[in-house]
Amino acid sequence: MPAIREQIQLGLDFGREEPIAVLRQRLLATYGPRRDARRHTPSEQFVKALISSETYDSASEKAFQALCEHFRPLDRLGQSDPRQVLTHLATVTHPEKKASQLVASVGRIVEQRGRFDLSHLAALSVEAGMELLQLYEGIGPKCAAAILNFSTLRRRVFVVDRHIKRFGERFGLFPQSVSFAMAHRIMLRLMPAAWDADDLYELHWLIKRFGQEVCTSQRPLCPRCEMAALCRHGSTSIPRVPTR
């Protein structure tokens, strides 16, 4: 698959296997399988994805649970004053902006669909679903992909967050300072055709955990990384033992 090989620009030695497959096997060996026990509905995932950007998972989960408790059904978000929503977003970043976006977007969906329901996305192609979702305030490529892949829709699309972007840049999957939109397109193109939506879901969480625990932004733990030889950052930051 030439398109895949063209993305590997750094001369890293992955052998004859596709780079993403090699990296996935290493991560699975370290962390084990990551399969979900429960999925949110598309509308629930819409809310969670929108408030989760640039926010720790534990903080966004707390805010999401508070919204579900106080605005059930979630259709009520679209009829609420953003100031009411804001009181439940204290744990997330940019709470004022997200409160406003949430009210506007949910309200628009209710106006279009009659209720806050995104089940119609199942009948659309992934590309059409991504395009449609990004018409709503607060929804970019990452959030749109999360709604499609993380929810009960289980669509075959890969979610690129800051951990995946950093991972991809360091392991030569795409160029430095690539946009999230381009990183999303490249990562999906790298995935073997045999990998289904659950495989992509699993890979996202494997890379994210690796990015949180080892391949961190400021002080990556390269000496303890078993994939350092495949990484342009790790392969240059670990002192080499002189040979005699």
Image (cartoon, helix red, strand yellow):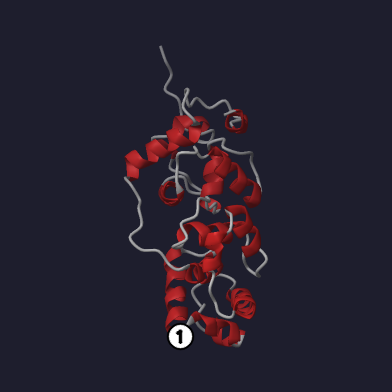
Position of 190 with respect to 203 (left or right) is: right
Nearer-the-camera pick, 40 or 121? 121
- Give the SS element for disc 1: helix
The amino acid type found where label 1 is placed reads: His
Residue 134 visible in the displayed image:
yes
Look at 60% across and 74% down and name the residue there: 98
The quadrant of the image that shows the N terminus is top right
Q: Position of residue 38 (x, y in %)?
A: 36, 63
Q: Position of residue 140 (x, y in %)?
A: 63, 61
Check the image and name the residue furthest to the top: 244
The quadrant of the image that shows the C terminus is top left
Position of 11 with respect to 17 (left or right) is: right
Look at 46% across and 74% down and name the residue there: 64
Tell me the crowding category of disc 1: few under 14, some 14 to 19, or many 20 or more residues within 10 angstroms, Cα based.
Answer: some
Look at 43% across and 42% down and name the residue there: 221
Residue tagged 1? 70
Position of 17 with respect to 140 (left or right) is: left
Reply above or below: 158 against 102: above
Reply above or below: 219 against 115: above
Q: Position of residue 54 (x, y in %)?
A: 55, 62
Q: Position of residue 215 (x, y in %)?
A: 46, 45
Please tell me how many numbered marks the rendered image carries. 1
